[in-house]
Amino acid sequence: MNLAIIGTGYVGLTTGVCLSDVGHTVFCVDNDIKKINMLKKGKIPIYEPDLEEILKRNVRKKRLFFTSSIKEVVKKTEVIFICVGTPPREDGSADLSYIEDVATAIANNMDSYKLIVDKSTVPVETGKRVETTIKRNLKKDVPFDVASNPEFLREGTAVHDTMHPDRLVIGVSSKKAENILKQVYKPLKSTILVTDIKSAELIKHASNSFLATKISFINAVANICELCGADVEKVAEGMGLDKRIGRAFLNAGIGFGGFCFPKDLEAFLWISKQLGYNFDLLKSVKTINENQKKTFVKKIEDALWNLKGKTVAILGLAFKPNTDDMRFAPSITIISELQQAGAKIKAYDPKAQERAKEILKNVTYCRTPYETVKGADCLAILTEWEDVKNMDLSKVKKLLKHPIIIDGRNVFDPEKIKSLGFVYKSIGR
Ligand code: UGA
């Protein structure tokens, strides 16, 4: 099939690349010409395992094309996926102006039936808005359908998640739209849930908010564990063995970050309020998440007494491993608070360092974990990268000024690390 993908961010690019790899002909559009030129040369603007290789393969096979012209692709394709950003506005609501712009541009160039599929994360009832926008801007009377097809891929495992999704959700209002989308996704052999458009839109916000709730729940339990001397890892294991709960997303830490959970939580709260429902539970999820970062800074302060003039070595800056994404990374708040208290920061991240430099100033960026810990008063772990997990700890001990590790991701076994002579504080144990 001939497919159009509008917007080449994480979701659009991964979807476009993967759908071309399963045999479709895909035209990816972005109004950022620099980005399009880069993609045409087979280079991706983000760090995402396997994505560049698959992109190159499909460009070579002439199944994957990049352009900045919506007009050109609307003419060539029947199914158009909207994958543009929906960034947060000051009041927490999602800025849907890019969606409106794209819907208008599609309508202006339609001369035959099109299925317009929204893949961007949007509040419930956006599908209706897209439909109205298209109707208003059509140049001639052509039939079309609007559908919602939320995306559940995670950064760092985006290719795997797209190729092997737990489920595909398609929200449609016609049998024709349902059949077309089923045909698009047939090669993935995944479970497809067909719903109405509003329910599909809600599934995305509800899923992300539920996962965020799981994380805040276990972080709250971790705080109780610290107060009474229990071990959150064991508690999570015991809870997770119950199939109704599951072990996933019960890793206590410094709180969730990234461009999805914090913004989707805000947007879900906002839309709930608009609809007349006070979603207090989500407010608590947010508060627990904010406090988790503050509690971590306190742990460092407790270990060092006064932060003024002390050097803290930070390992990991990205909001999670296997990504270079720094958006809403907990490291931003934690490092800023440490700096405000007078601490000097040395930092290392295997992939996110360049992006971090644009956000976090007055930081000494290092090339290796060992260079980072050298001479520092303590080590703080913020992202569970493999090369942090695999460090030679005896070397780390020799290089640190004092053998103190504050671990925000529970990377090490407390008993083992204490036996090596470290002062070790982690989360909830
Ligand atoms: C999340 C969802 O997992 C995806 O399903 C969704 O498609 C995506 O948002 C989106 O809406 O685009 P992502 O933000 O890439 O994916 O990353 P996650 O793996 O979900 O991690 C989010 C944050 O939660 C990270 O900061 C991570 O460190 C934290 N986390 C995750 C925990 O603190 N504990 C856990 O047990 C799991």
Image: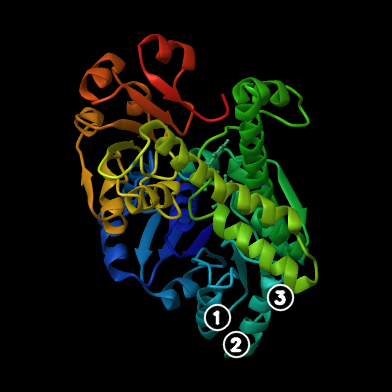
Lower sequence index among marks 3 and 2: 3
> Which residue is nearer to you in this view: 395 or 145?
395
What kind of residue is marked 1? Met
Q: CA distance from mark 2 to mark 1?
A: 7 Å
User: Residue beneath label 2, please?
Assistant: 138
SS class of the residue under badge 3? helix
SS class of the residue under badge 2? loop
Q: Is residue 382 in sight in this rendering?
A: no
Whether the residue under disc 2 has CB within 8 Å of ligand 1? no
Q: Position of residue 16 (x, y in %)?
A: 46, 54
Front disc: 1 or 3: 3
User: Residue beneath label 3, please?
Assistant: 128
Label disc, if present, on residue 110 of the rendered structure: 1
Ligand 1 positioned in quadrant = top right
Label disc, if present, on residue 227 of the rendered structure: none
Q: Quadrant of the C terminus?
A: top right
